[in-house]
């Protein structure tokens, strides 16, 4: 991928991590290794990590949306005056 702008670097890294976690889950499903207990443990750990990463991304997107909304409100006030 092309380098992300500084403003979005953190979310870019988090999305990349999320992709790698999803890829690991997919690879485990396609080519399971170990016994049932170790496989279940690995999938559960990946699932927890995926949910954590996804929540972090949701929070960051919310912050970006809030920032854009604030910018829009300020611009609207400036134009109104």
Image: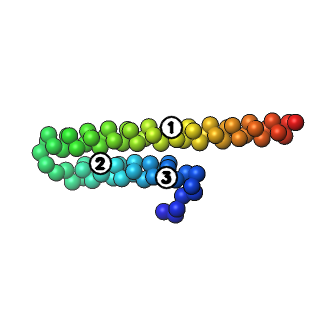
Label 1, residues with CA under 10 Å away: few <14, some 14-19, many ≥20: few
Q: Residue at x 67, y 38 (%)?
A: 69
Label of residue 25 in the image:
2
Q: Report how far apart the C-alphas of labels 2 and 3 lie in the structure.
A: 20 Å
Of the numbered discs 1 and 2, the one sitting upstream in the chain is 2
The figure's colour scheme reads rainbow
Q: Report how far apart the C-alphas of labels 1 and 2 lie in the structure.
A: 23 Å
Of the numbered discs 3 and 1, the one sitting upstream in the chain is 3
Task: Assess whether mark 2 and mark 1 are in contact (beta carbons under 8 angstroms).
Answer: no
| Farthest right residue in view | 81
Mark 1: secondary structure:
helix
Q: Residue at x 82, y 39 (%)?
A: 78
Q: Which residue is mark 3?
A: 12
Image depth: mark 1 or mark 2 in front: 1
- Can you give x and y, in whole percent of width and height, for residue 5 in the image? 57, 57
Q: Which residue is mark 1?
A: 59
Mark 2: secondary structure:
helix
Residue 75 occupies quadrant: top right
- Can you give x and y, in whole percent of width and height, for residue 70 in the image? 69, 37
Mark 3: secondary structure:
helix
- Can you give x and y, in whole percent of width and height, for residue 53 in the image? 40, 42
| Farthest left residue in view | 35
Q: Report how far apart the C-alphas of labels 3 and 1 lie in the structure.
A: 13 Å
Quadrant occupied by the C terminus: top right
Q: Residue at x 16, y 51 (%)?
A: 33
């Amino acid at each position: 991928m092309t380098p992300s702008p500084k403003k979005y670097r953190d979310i870019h890294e988090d999305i990349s991590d999320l992709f790698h976690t999803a890829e690991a889950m997919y690879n485990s499903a396609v080519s399971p290794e170990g016994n049932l207990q170790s496989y279940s443990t690995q999938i559960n750990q990946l699932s927890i990590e995926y949910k954590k990463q996804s929540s972090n991304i949701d929070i960051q997107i919310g912050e970006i949306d809030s920032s854009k909304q604030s910018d829009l409100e300020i611009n609207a006030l400036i134009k109104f005056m």
